[in-house]
Image (spheres, rainbow, N blue to C red):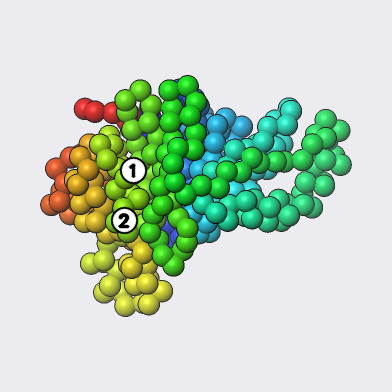
Amino acid sequence: MQMIILGSGSPLPDPQRAGPSTLVRTEAGDLLFDCGRGVLMRAAAVASGAGALRGLFLTHLHSDHTTDLNDVITSRWVMSFQPSPLRVFGPPGTASLLTATEAMLELDIGYRMAHHADLNWRPSADVVECEGGQVLAEQSVRITVAPTDHAPVRPTVGYRVDEGGRSVVIAGDTVPCPGLDELCAGADMLVHTVVRRDLIEPIGLPRLTDVLDYHSSVEDAARTAARHGVGTLVLTHLVPAPQPDAEHEWVERAGEHFDGTVVVARDLLALDVGPG
């Protein structure tokens, strides 16, 4: 099993960081977690794409995590040679988002069907709304979901992928909470969104300081990882995005609370999931 960061960014546009999205490669196929801006451009760089996805898993419905949902839907549809519904998993509200996205694409759908005689079906998705329990079991792959806490955004979820005794948790946006604890128990890897309070508070802008109460700090994420014996902590969705020469500060902050491996995410970072 391999974890690839397709997008390590945040709502703030960054030329080096696409929007939040993580690809997990398994025996059952490619699994995409969230679909922020630029996701398919990054996926192309690792020889993946919308047509290759065995499933799309949304942690929550904030725009920065769903910006390119329309691109995933359209690209999968126009590049397929027979109907290929996209499997989408997410918290309650996901079905409404898919319906609204398809309505937004209605003109484009009409244009393409009128132009391509062999494209005689509409894009479609099989949606599973979920908040807890096992949501997928294929070959040796098991995916479990649990509720997280990103209030006032409700509901939100995190995911755990298990395959062959290896496990990776995709936390999404959350503060420490029981659901995340449940997913992290004994996991090999935790991919966690993080913010830096010490860098955000001095800026003094309410729109920025507001993000502090519903995201985990680096220290929060490190304590969660330590509490559950996680092997590797991957810090992503970094706010504010660090310059390369400052990434060590994030690692050092996490290292004060966690003695495992700490990695600061960058786009196209690829790590094998497992011990050692």
Query: Residue most toward the front?
Result: 133
Q: Is residue 107 above or below residue 87?
A: below
Cα–Cα gap, marks 2 and 1: 10 Å
As drawn, is 238 to the left or to the right of 257?
Answer: right
> Closer to the N terminus: mark 2 or mark 1?
2
Residue 13 visible in rendering? no
Please provide percent x and percent y for residue 127: 61, 43
What SS does tag 2 mark? loop
Residue 268 versus residue 141: which sits nearer the camera?
141
The quadrant holding residue 259 is top left
Q: Total of numbered circles in the picture? A: 2
The image's mark for residue 177 is 2
Residue at 27% across / 59% down in the picture?
A: 217
Q: Residues within 10 Å of mark 2 (few under 14, many from 20)?
A: few
As drawn, is 68 to the left or to the right of 263?
Answer: right
Residue at 77% across / 49% down in the picture?
A: 108
Residue at 70% across / 41% down in the picture?
A: 124
Residue at 47% across / 21% down in the picture?
A: 139
Q: Is residue 159 above or below residue 162?
A: below
Please provide percent x and percent y for residue 119: 80, 34
The quadrant holding residue 72 is top right
Please provide percent x and percent y for residue 126: 64, 40
Residue 173 versus residue 127: which sits nearer the camera?
127
Q: Where's the C terminus, which quadrant?
A: top left
What SS does tag 1 mark? helix
User: Which residue bears the numbered disc 1?
Assistant: 183
